[in-house]
Each structure stands twice: as structure tokens, then as C-alpha cells.
Image (cartoon, rainbow, N blue to C red):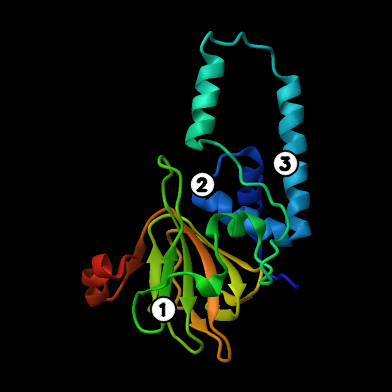
Amino acid sequence: MRIGHHPEEATVVAYAAGTLDEPLAVAVASHLAWCGACRRVVRVGEAIGGALLDSMEETPLRDDALARAMGRLDAGVGVRTEPSGVDSDGLGLPYPLASRLGAPLDHLRWHRRGRGVAVHALPLSANASGRLLLVRGVAGTRMPAHGHEGAEITVVLRGAYRDAFGRFAMGDVAELGEDAEHAPVVEPGEDCICLVATEGRLRFGNPLLRLLRPLLGV
């Protein structure tokens, strides 16, 4: 696999520090399962974090520290999703994603969200913010121009698409902020399936699409 697009280095370091929200952490972990270069960035970030901890003065723990820590673990707060290679369902999915699916991509229940586009929402912890979706675009589909309310990280799992930022194929990551807008076009020949983690909803310039957004679920 030849990966040409990666998350921002600051995002990978934030993943290493355990500070990303759950949807973004799952997306980054899925990319890391395929990308040795980004795994090296994680190791550097972890080493720096460890050195900083070693240099800090010791602070007495509160009496309820253990109970509070266990409560955060039960709620999924601050827990990183570790990159662990690929699963064994024959599709080569990253394990951090495959472990949440329970079924191969082709056996999932997809919900149409416009012409040529379908989504499958993935479950998150009860206190998680943002959303984690699988988005499937039929080959040749041109998606409406849109922006994002908050950060969005997209990992391509199958097929490829193009937009103003380049061509994105299997393993590639598109990381977009609130100021970015694009209109992805799925390449012909194969449907494109992406893992999409968002902090907010899509922002459309088209007034009609803004009105329909609650119905589209995006």
C-alpha cells in the first residue's frame, strides 16, 4: 500500500497523548494500523511525554484517585484505540475499525443519504462527542460542495476520490478544518468507502441542502 496523505503531525502527537476525542482517535488509529511512518511519530510523542513526566515533581494522590480513574476507564474517557494491524475478514480492514463493526463492509446495513451516497453510523461511548461514520460513494458520484463544523478526519478504506486537495486512495487521510470546503468526486470503476470522524455536522452552501440536512442526517 502506498500512502500519500497523512494526518497532521500535531494530530498524531495528540493521539499519542490521548487527548483526541473518540471518533478522531479511532480514525487516526485506523490509519496508523497501515502507516509505519505515522507509528514512528507516535513513538516519538510517547517518548517525549514520558520524559516530561519523569521531570515533573511528585504530587500526592487524592484519596479517591483510583475510583476516579476507574470511572473514567469505564466511561471510555481518554482511552486510546491502539493500532493493531489488520483483521482477518479478508478485506484487510484496520483492526481498530474492524473490532467495532462485527461484520464485513459488504454485510453492513447502509442508509441512503442522497444520490449515490450511503452511510453506516458506528457506535461511540455514551459520553463521546462528535460522530463516526462509514460513508460509501458509488463510482462516479460527485458529492455536493460542503464544509465542516469542526475538524473532520477521513480515512479511505476502499476505492478512491478526488477533490481540490488531491487524490485520496486506500490508507490515505484527509484532515480538514472548519475553514476548508470541498466537493469529492468518486473515481469510476469502484465504489469508495471511507471512515469519517467529525466534531460537528456538514455545512452546505446550497440553501436547499441546508434545509434538507436534518433529513439527510449529516
| Local secondary structure at mark 3 | helix
Q: From the top left corner, tell me how far across and down residue 203 is, in percent.
A: 34, 65
The residue singled out by tag 2 in the image is 22
In space, the residues marked 3 and 2 are separated at their CA atoms by: 19 Å
Identify the amino acid type marked 3: Gly
Residue at point 43% right, 44% down?
Answer: 128
Q: Find residue 194 and report its image quarter.
A: bottom right
Q: From the top left corner, tell me how far across and down residue 200 is, in percent.
A: 38, 55
Q: Which of 165 and 64 is in front in this view?
A: 64
| Local secondary structure at mark 1 | strand
The residue singled out by tag 1 in the image is 117
Identify the amino acid type marked 2: Glu
Q: Which of 103 and 4 is in front in this view?
A: 103
Q: Do the residues bearing badges 1 and 3 touch, measured as CB atoms within 8 Å?
A: no
Identify the amino acid type marked 1: Val
In space, the residues marked 1 and 2 are separated at their CA atoms by: 24 Å
The residue singled out by tag 3 in the image is 45
